């Protein structure tokens, strides 16, 4: 029997509450909502790092950022790490990618061509790290040039933070979907199973949706809700957040929430949602391609994101060493053969669980280096929905992307159903939230004596989770 095909759609910096199926009444996401209705939706899925490279290294290997030694943006993933694409390639899969990969340093000052690759198993590699990047190997740029066009965002009136990007037909998200459709329909003629990773750049900043997608939000701009922020809430929170309030990534004047007007906040949120709407349309194209080519029911489809976006919540934008749910809680939807559909699963899960899930779903050998826990028992219905997949979830940020001179953030998080604890190891500051009484995470109970026993229990959990990031490799070969 042929192994299932796998279409893995990964967006960049998309928080969970950006889809209709997750309760957002503003966005227009019928295709992803339909995918969820036919598959399994995870209500509590969490990334293992709130920035790109360590998160991606984690979910593509099934290992934690510290274990992969890929702890920060700007690092190169070590050559001995095994991506799920390589493991599936060894099992006979034809593997392809469109968009960004970001497992190695991606900056024109360092990388003059395509980012450095390890033996990743990809047979086809359509690479575009950033739609407006300076690499000559940016295939999206080449595609635009072939159409006689260039990437040319246009400013939105009276906004320093939002611009109109290319029309939808010329957008990088559209290009990624087009590459996926070509791969899907070509491989329908062959017997071997395939794996295709669609790595969309959006809704990552800059906030530049096509004009036609933003305009429907502009008609009701004054009704768009403002970010979740309470005046003075950062006063008893770690210093890194107060710095980012005055400029994302600690850079003065760059998306400084503290100097924005209400219109600025609403316009950025509208642009972000508009980018999510475009993603949904292109997901619809890919699903239509699967159905048209007769492969929908033989293909596992994953929709998720590498991490979230602060979007003005708690007085900050973008990302950093911050572990609010808007930063670390992501959409995760899975549909396909053997998956019991039409379900919302409330279990705590980690993105590190995806790689071992795909090995089990494809009946491939278990890789001893993986630390994630397969979701296949939950997806297949073999494990009861009331069974707890995990007691807690774990996330880490080791100087991952926070350029503040000598100030460096080394932080870890543990989160249970009810509580969240964050510890900044370099200065012993921290956060503690009771998610039942404070679901918005506005009130830091770190110094609250009423939570002393909860804090101790969570510190023990955090210590245990950190211990369990010890690399299981190399495997033991004898008793001594």
Image: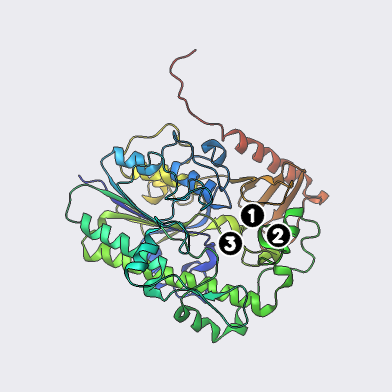
Is 105 displayed left or right of 355 in the figure? right
Q: Which residue is mark 2?
A: 244
Is 245 displayed left or right of 334 in the figure? right
At 29% from the left and 46% from the top, the residue drawn is 123
Quadrant of the image occupied by residue 457: top right
Packing grade of label 2 (10 A; few <14, some 14-19, many >=20) is many
Q: CA distance from mark 2 to mark 3?
A: 13 Å
Q: Which residue is mark 3?
A: 309
Residue placed furthest toward the bottom: 219
Does residue 192 appear in this view? yes
Q: CA distance from mark 1 to mark 2?
A: 8 Å
Name the element at disc 2. Answer: helix
What number is the disc on residue 320?
A: 1
Q: Are marks 1 and 3 in contact (CB under 8 Å)?
A: no
Give whichever of discs 1 and 3 has the lower sequence position.
Answer: 3
At 45% from the left and 52% from the top, the residue drawn is 385
- Residue 463, horizontal then vertical, whole percent: 66, 36
At 46% from the left and 68% from the top, the residue drawn is 21
Vertical position of residue 258 compared to residue 190: above or below: below
Is 404 displayed left or right of 87 in the figure? right
- 215 or 158: nearer the viewer: 158
Packing grade of label 1 (10 A; few <14, some 14-19, many >=20) is many
Q: Are marks 1 and 2 in contact (CB under 8 Å)?
A: yes
Give whichever of discs 2 and 3 has the lower sequence position.
Answer: 2
Vertical position of residue 36 compared to residue 320: above or below: below
Vertical position of residue 59 compared to residue 437: above or below: above
- 17 or 339: nearer the viewer: 17
Does residue 333 appear in this view? no
Give whichever of discs 1 and 2 has the lower sequence position.
Answer: 2
- Residue 107, horizontal then vertical, whole percent: 52, 52
């Amino acid at each position: 029997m042929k192994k299932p095909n796998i279409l893995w759609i990964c967006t960049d910096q998309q928080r969970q509450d950006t889809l209709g199926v997750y309760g957002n009444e503003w966005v227009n996401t019928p295709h992803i909502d339909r995918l969820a209705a036919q598959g399994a939706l995870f209500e509590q899925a969490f990334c293992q790092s709130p920035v790109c490279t360590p998160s991606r290294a984690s979910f593509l290997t099934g290992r934690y950022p510290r274990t992969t030694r890929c702890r920060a943006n700007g690092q190169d993933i070590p050559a001995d790490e095994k991506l799920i694409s390589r493991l599936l390639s060894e099992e006979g899969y034809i593997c392809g990618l469109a968009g960004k990969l970001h497992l190695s340093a991606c900056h024109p000052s360092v990388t003059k061509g395509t980012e450095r690759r390890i033996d990743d198993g990809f047979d086809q590699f359509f690479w575009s790290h950033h739609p407006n990047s300076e690499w000559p190997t940016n295939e999206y740029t080449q595609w635009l040039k072939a159409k006689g066009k260039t990437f040319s965002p246009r400013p939105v009136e009276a906004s320093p933070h939002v611009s109109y990007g290319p029309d939808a037909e010329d957008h990088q998200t559209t290009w990624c979907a087009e590459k996926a459709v070509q791969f899907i329909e070509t491989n329908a003629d062959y017997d071997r199973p395939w794996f295709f990773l669609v790595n969309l750049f959006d809704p990552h900043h800059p906030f530049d949706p096509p004009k036609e997608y933003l305009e429907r939000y502009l008609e009701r701009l004054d009704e768009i809700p403002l970010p979740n922020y309470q005046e003075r809430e950062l006063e008893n929170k770690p210093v890194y957040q107060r710095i980012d309030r005055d400029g994302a990534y600690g850079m003065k004047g760059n998306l400084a929430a503290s100097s924005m007007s209400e219109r600025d906040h609403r316009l950025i949120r509208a642009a972000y949602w508009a980018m999510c709407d475009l993603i949904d349309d292109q997901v619809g194209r890919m699903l239509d391609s699967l159905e048209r080519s007769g492969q929908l029911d033989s293909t596992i489809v994953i929709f998720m994101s590498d991490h979230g976006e602060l979007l003005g919540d708690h007085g900050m934008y973008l990302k950093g060493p911050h572990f609010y749910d808007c930063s670390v809680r992501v959409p995760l939807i899975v549909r396909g053969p053997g998956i019991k559909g039409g379900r919302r699963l409330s279990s705590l899960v980690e993105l590190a669980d995806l790689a071992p899930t795909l090995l089990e779903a494809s009946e491939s050998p278990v890789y001893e280096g993986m630390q994630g826990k397969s979701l296949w028992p939950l997806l297949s219905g073999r494990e009861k929905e009331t069974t707890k997949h995990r007691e807690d979830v774990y996330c880490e940020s080791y100087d991952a992307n926070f350029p503040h001179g000598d100030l460096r953030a080394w932080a870890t998080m543990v989160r249970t159903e009810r509580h969240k604890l964050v510890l900044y190891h370099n200065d012993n500051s921290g956060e503690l939230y009771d998610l039942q009484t404070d679901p918005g995470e506005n009130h830091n109970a770190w110094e609250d004596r009423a939570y002393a026993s909860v804090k101790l229990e969570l510190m023990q959990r955090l210590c245990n989770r950190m211990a369990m990031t010890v690399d299981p490799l190399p495997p033991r070969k004898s008793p001594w």
